[in-house]
Image (spheres, rainbow, N blue to C red):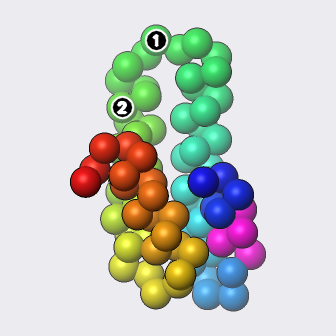
Amino acid sequence: MIRKAIAITGAINQKAATIGQWILDDLRKLIATIADGSEDNRLIRKLLAGLRRVGHLGQKVEHTLVTSLSQRNSIGIGMQ
């Protein structure tokens, strides 16, 4: 998912690039939080909620990689 998000940040479509950057930033924050051994469930839930919101936005953008990543993101965090 991170590779796709990185690829999307370089997209010509500005909306797609912005969404890709949001997904990338949120994924990195989530991974860092978990890797640090945080037991702050509120923070983890907040980060997951952010990824869900960006996933919803991504499904509305007409860009193949964004749509693919958004669907994968939604499935990966229990949205569907």
Quadrant location of the C terminus? Answer: bottom left
Query: Which of the labelled discs sits on residue 22, or is there none?
Result: none
- Viewer-side residue, 1 vs 61: 1
- Disc 2 marks a residue whose amino acid type is Arg
Quarter the N terminus occupies: bottom right
Q: Position of residue 47 (x, y in %)?
A: 44, 38
Q: Residue at x 53, y 81 (%)?
A: 64
Q: Is residue 17 at least partly visible in the picture?
A: yes
Q: Quadrant of the rendered structure where residue 37 is? A: top right
| Residue 45, label in figure | 2
Q: Residue at x 65, y 63 (%)?
A: 4
Q: What predominant SS class does the magenta segment belong to? A: helix
Mark closest to the chain's N terminus, 1 or 2: 1
Residue 31 left/right relative to 57: right
Amino acid at the residue labelled 1:
Glu
- Picture layout, residue 41 above or below residue 22: above
Residue 79, above or below 44: below
Q: Secondary structure beneath disc 2?
A: helix
Mark 1 and 2 residues: CB-CB less than 8 Å, in contact?
A: no
Rendered position, 80 above or below 9: above
Image location (x, y in percent) of residue 22: 56, 58
Residue 73 is covered by the magenta coloring: no
Region in magenta: 6-10
**Image quarter of residue 42:** top left
Q: Which residue is mark 1?
A: 39
Q: Secondary structure at mark 1?
A: loop
Farthest-out residue, left: 80
Residue 3 percent location from the top left of the image:
70, 58
Specify whether residue 9 is painted magenta.
Answer: yes
x, y percentage for residue 5? 64, 61
